[in-house]
């Protein structure tokens, strides 16, 4: 039996970025379409009314523009995050079109105004990750914003990722919030029972 190696977050981050650089932009787009198609058939998505979705801003993150357009076309209410630079927490506002999205001083795309930090109405969270383990431990850029955001919610949390972003085991801390589902171009992983559907 092959022993699974626990990878430090920094190593997982570096490997995922390296692997991505080895895949052509055309192949990334093809895989992304498959991931969105697979995600849009999930019960979690079909049942959801209000979806919280990040706006991809960093190299290595799954691009969400097409995904947001797809959800908008399905009649979903989409909530997008805005960084509060004072509290270093994520506020939210409703997505009302790309004309109301701009880059902030730190290079993140976000709505031009924030509303509040109350996400009690959100049915489904789509969470960014540079790398993620099959147990649901994700690696971002180290700000911890999403762990703070997700700590007090029981809604389903999903990462959309390419297969090259997946690892068996990634180090975690008690502050890290686990993801419930991972959707790739090949499969859906339920991290809570480790059941995989092709």
Image (cartoon, rainbow, N blue to C red):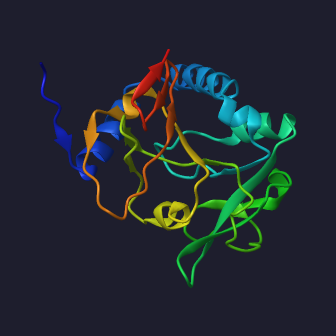
Q: Name the side, left or right, on which 61 lies relative to 139.
A: right
Extreme-bottom residue of the structure: 86
User: Which quadrant holds residue 18?
Assistant: top left
Residue at the farthest front position: 193
In terms of depth relative to the viewer, which is nearer, 102 or 66?
66
Q: Is residue 14 left or right of residue 146?
A: left
Q: Is residue 6 left or right of residue 100?
A: left
Return the x and y of residue 185 as percentages of the image width and height: 52, 21
Residue 29, percent across and down? 59, 25
Q: Give 136 or 105, whichever is nearer the viewer.
A: 136
Image: 22 above or below 55? above
Q: Is residue 195 above or below residue 116?
A: above
The reply to whether residue 21 is visible in this rendering is: no
Quadrant of residue 30 within the rendered picture? top right
> Looking at the image, is 181 positioned above or below residue 13?
above
Could you tell me which residue is drawn at 69 percent across and 23 percent down? 41
Residue at position x 63%, y 22% in the image: 38
Asked whether residue 40 is in view, the answer is: yes
Q: In the image, is residue 186 above or below residue 177?
A: above
Between residue 63 and residue 124, name the one nearer to us: 124
Residue at left 80%, top 51%? Answer: 98
Name the residue furthest top: 198
Q: Where's the N terminus, which quadrant?
A: top left
Q: How many marks?
A: 0
């Amino acid at each position: 039996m092959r022993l699974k190696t626990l990878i430090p977050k920094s190593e997982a981050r570096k490997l995922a970025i390296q692997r991505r650089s080895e895949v052509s932009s055309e192949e990334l787009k093809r895989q992304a379409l498959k991931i969105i198609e697979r995600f849009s058939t999930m019960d979690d998505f079909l049942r959801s009314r209000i979806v919280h979705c990040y706006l991809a801003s960093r190299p290595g993150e799954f691009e969400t523009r097409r995904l947001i357009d797809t959800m908008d076309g399905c009649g979903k209410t989409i909530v997008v995050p805005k960084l509060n630079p004072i509290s270093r927490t994520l506020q939210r506002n409703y997505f009302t079109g790309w004309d109301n999205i701009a880059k902030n001083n730190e290079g993140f795309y976000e709505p031009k105004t924030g509303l509040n930090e109350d996400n009690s109405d959100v049915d489904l969270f789509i969470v960014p990750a540079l790398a993620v383990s099959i147990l649901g431990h994700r690696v971002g850029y180290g700000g911890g914003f999403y762990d703070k955001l997700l700590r007090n919610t029981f809604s389903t949390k999903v990462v959309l990722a390419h297969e090259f972003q997946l690892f068996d085991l990634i180090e975690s801390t008690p502050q890290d919030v686990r993801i419930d589902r991972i959707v790739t171009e090949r499969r859906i992983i339920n991290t809570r029972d480790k059941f995989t559907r092709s």
